[in-house]
Amino acid sequence: MRKLRISAAALLIILAGCAHNISAPSRALVDRSVTFRQLIENPYAYHGKMIMLGGTVAAVEHTREGTRLEVIEHRLDSRELPDESVSSRGRFLATTPESLDSAKFEPGTLVTMAGEVVGQKSEKRQGVVYTYPLIAIREIHDIVIEQETHWGSFGGM
């Protein structure tokens, strides 16, 4: 019986490691042939395509139309998690008519999302014009990375 419980626990751990952040219905719509480099070069060529992206939230803006995130793109790994060890290839804007929780999606938060390419947007920042691919969010998830807590000795007692 003990071996059965250990085996069941091990299976659950393995299955949890294979879980996807994005739902199966959204993943089924994603066109995985579209690369971020292609998207950056010509967002209009992929208008209407569903893609999956990830990265680090750089800014959050709430408007009457909903929420807009500026995201520093990071390639997704096999678990659909943003890989910060690889250099970013640029930024994109992601919008939703919903009011996203600012505390949950604050700057510095890692996200994975599926969304539809709707074009591009140019904005002037510090005297420089930046052009971003514009993505309508279908599904978005914040990524919480468990960090180890190290307890040290406090001495003195």
Image (tube, rainbow, N blue to C red):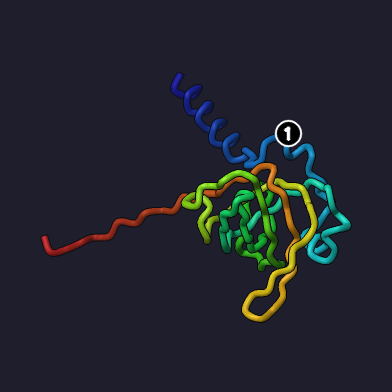
> In the image, what residue occupies the spot 58% across and 63% down?
58
Residue 2, image x, y percentages: 44, 22
Residue at image location 37% in from the left, 54% down from the top: 149
- Expressed as whole percent of the image width and height from the top left, the position of residue 117 reads 78, 52
In terms of depth relative to the viewer, which is nearer, 80 or 38? 38
Q: Residue 144: x, y in percent? A: 51, 49
Q: Residue furthest top?
A: 1
32 to the left or right of 108: right
From this viewpoint, which residue is outermost toward the left? 157
> Residue at the right extreme?
45
Image location (x, y in percent) of residue 114: 70, 46
**Observer-nearest residue: 84 or 38?**
38
The one of 74 and 3 positioned closer to us in this rendering: 74
Residue of label 1 = 25
Q: Amino acid at mark 1?
A: Pro
Q: Is residue 76 left or right of residue 39?
A: left
